[in-house]
Amino acid sequence: MSQAARAETFAALHRGESFLIPNPWDAGSARMLEALRFAALAT
């Protein structure tokens, strides 16, 4: 996926309902949050 496509996907999240962006603390927690189907992860 191109950077432009990723940016558009992220921008689209802001046009819908409110959403949570969790902040993983390591690679393991990032994989866990991804498996829980969060739409985005903070850094």
Image (spheres, rainbow, N blue to C red):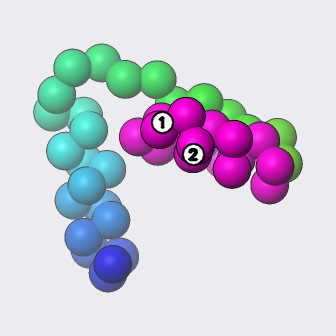
- Residue 41 point in image, percent of width and height: 56, 43
Q: Residue at x 37, y 23 (%)?
A: 19
Q: Which residue is mark 1?
A: 38
- Residue 29 point in image, percent of width and height: 77, 41
Look at the picture and state if 40 lies above or below 1.
above
- Residue 24 point in image, percent of width and height: 73, 39
Tell me, for residue 34, which label it has, or none: 2
Label 1 SS: loop
Residue 36 drawn in magenta: yes
Query: Can you say which quadrant of the picture contains the N terminus?
Result: bottom left
Q: Dot 1: within a 10 Å radius of its alpha carbon, few (fewer than 14), some, or many (20 or more) residues?
A: some
**Going by the picture, which residue comes out furthest to the front?**
35
Q: Amino acid at mark 2?
A: Glu
Measure the C-alpha gap from mark 1 to mark 2: 6 Å
**Going by the picture, which residue comes out furthest to the top?**
18
Q: Which residues are magenta?
A: 27-43
